[in-house]
Image (cartoon, rainbow, N blue to C red):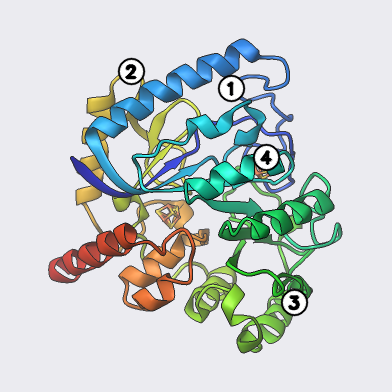
Amino acid sequence: MLKVLGVDDGSFKPCNFACKYCRKYPSKKLADGYFDPIRGSTSFNQYRNQHTQVITVLEDKIESTFYKISGHGEISLIPDFLGLLPSSFGKPILITNGSRLKERDLPKLAEIDAVLSISLDGHTSILNTARSGKVESVLSLIRVACDYDIPIEINSVLSKWNMEDFDEFLFFLKKFSNLVCFPFPVRDFSTQLNESYKASYKQFQVFKEKVLDNYQEFNYILPPFQYLENMLSTMKIGRQIPCFLPNIIISLNWQFDILKCPCGPTGNLGNLLNSPNKALNQWKKQSEKYSKKFLFHECNQCYTHFDIINLYLLGKITSLDLRKIPSLSNTKTTKFLKEYSTKCTKEN
Ligand code: SF4
Ligand code: SF4
């Protein structure tokens, strides 16, 4: 069995939102999607069948500590989407824009010990200027999920619209338990982004004063301080720390290709539907080549919630810090990361 930290399943691409900073926009909503979720029930079935085929292959060949779906689209567009979550890959993590998840879905998520990873840039419409949808429905989902005691990670993209007032969002989130908020920047990949979303240096400074300099006020709903410090420096001068993610996470795109990395370039290592053995061998080869140099030109501007893993592997945060993070605070994940960190220390 191939041991990996996680499977990052981005195979479902259609979304009911059209956020300004999303990778697939400003191309037309759903225009480049895999199928039209509103009309295509046959396509839902096709997706389900292909997904089952791929998961069956992976279950046979890999051992993982978490399984994250989807991040590249809104998985709850699929009727009975909860049936797509495999039980064999460790902690299930459901990424959602929160617009379509219903209260009736929550008992099942609680039962399988899942983490809800909700994308939201603030608690008001103004802070969410870059996003689609109504903020109030997402906030009410958060309230109900907390009642079910489902751990929540909020993923917030920092842009010129929310950076200066992000502390207000954090004050708002303080009333919830079992919740961590991960801010991260709009990544500066030239094909995806428009300069107009980016915050100014003055806004970075305001964010530093209100959030980092006031960290004690928010420490139990924010990731470790080192995460925020490295995030700000990446936003100002580019990425400074190496990245292990392509070596430990298998990530899939909408065609069930294994991507070279979960967050950056679109290049792939092979297809899991057509040639799974070849694709997994290619991933294994890549995973064995660890270099402190950046693998891709996109790395320079890349910083995501996954960087918490890099910080741990670089010895900048401890396993106690990791325990704060719902998606990583389980024994299997900590054990994998401890072993991998020992291996890295020996090899470097
Ligand atoms: S909700 Fe997520 S996948 Fe959908 S458009 Fe917004 S950023 Fe993209
Ligand atoms: S830093 Fe580079 S290798 Fe790591 S996730 Fe970002 S683009 Fe991928």
| Residue at the left extreme of this rendering | 346
* Residue 171: numbered disc: 3
In the rendered image, which residue does mark 1 sit on? 34
| Residue 226, percent from left and from top | 48, 79
In the rendered image, which residue does mark 4 sit on? 104
Q: Is residue 231 above or below residue 133?
A: below
Q: Which badge, 3 or 2, is on the more N-terminal residue?
A: 3
Q: Which badge, 2 or 4, is on the more N-terminal residue?
A: 4
| Residue 180, percent from left and from top | 58, 67
Q: Which corner quadrant of the image does residue 274 belong to?
A: top left
Residues 180 and 200: in front is: 180
Q: Secondary structure at mark 1?
A: loop
Residues 207 and 220: in front is: 220
Q: CA distance from mark 1 to mark 4?
A: 27 Å
Say few, some or many: other residues with alpha carbon within 10 Å of mark 3 (under 14 / 14 to 19 / 20 or more).
few
From the viewer's perspective, is the residue at label 2 or at label 4 nearer?
4
Where is the C terminus found, in terms of image quarters? bottom left
From the viewer's perspective, is the residue at label 1 or at label 4 nearer?
4
Using residue 312 as the reference point, say whether residue 230 is left or right of it. right
Disc 1: residue Cβ within 8 A of ligand 1's nearest atom: no
